[in-house]
Amino acid sequence: METQELHRGRLIDHLQLVVRDLAASQAFYAAVFEALHVPMGGTGEGYFWADELFVSSANSPAALGHLTGRTHLAFQARDRAMVAAFYRAALAHGGTDNGAPGERAYHPGYYAAFVLDPDGNNIEAVFHGEAQRSAASVQITF
C-alpha cells in the first residue's frame, strides 16, 4: 500500500452526491473548488472527488442506481473575497443563484453565498469571520 495523506478535523468523514449529469457537475464543482483553493482529488469511470466530497453518476457501483435528494452542503471560505469568488465561479459554470454573498443572521460575522448546483443541491460557501485556527487541517498519514 502506498502512503497516503488525509487532512481531517471536522464531523464529516465524507459525503457522496449522486448526480444526473456527471460532466455538468464536474464542470461546476471544478470551478467551485478552484475558487475555494481546494484541489481535485481524482476522477474515475463514473465519479470524481475532492477532499471529503465524492460525486458519482447513478450507474456507479457506489450509487446503486439511485440519485441523492436535495442536499445542503456548505464549504468553508478563508475570507469574504473567497465567498464572492465561489459565487461567481458557480454561476458561470451551471449554478443558479440561491442567495448572493452577504451577511446572514445565523451569528455575528456569518458571511455566505448560496447557489443551486446542476442537480438542485443547495451549495454554500461561508466565512465565519476573523478567527485563529490551531491548524489548517489535521494531517493523517497511513
Image: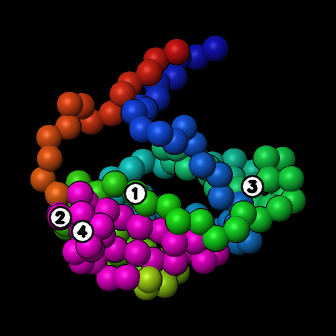
Residue position marked by numbered label 3 in the rendering:
46
Q: Amino acid at mark 1?
A: Phe
Q: How many marks?
A: 4
Above/below status of 3 relative to 16: above
Q: How far apart are the two marked residues, 1 and 4, measured between alpha carbons?
A: 12 Å
Q: How far apart are the two marked residues, 4 and 3, measured between alpha carbons?
A: 34 Å
The question of residue 113 being in magenta is answered with: yes
User: Mark 1 vs mark 2: which is more N-terminal?
Assistant: 1
Residue position marked by numbered label 4 in the rendering:
111
The reply to whether residue 64 is visible in this rendering is yes
Q: Nearer the viewer, residue 74 or 118?
A: 74
Q: Residues within 10 Å of mark 1 (few under 14, many from 20)?
A: some
Image coordinates of residue 110 in percent, x first then y, are 24, 65
Q: Nearer the viewer, residue 129 or 120?
A: 129
Q: Are marks 1 and 2 in contact (CB under 8 Å)?
A: no
- Image quadrant in which you'd find residue 124: bottom left
| Helix, strand or loop at mark 4 | strand
Image coordinates of residue 31 in percent, x first then y, are 43, 66
Residue position marked by numbered label 2 in the rendering:
108
Q: Amino acid at mark 4?
A: Tyr
The reply to whether residue 92 is visible in this rendering is no
Image coordinates of residue 42 in percent, x first then y, are 57, 45
| Helix, strand or loop at mark 2 | loop
Badge nearest the viewer, 3 or 2: 2
Q: Amino acid at mark 2?
A: Pro
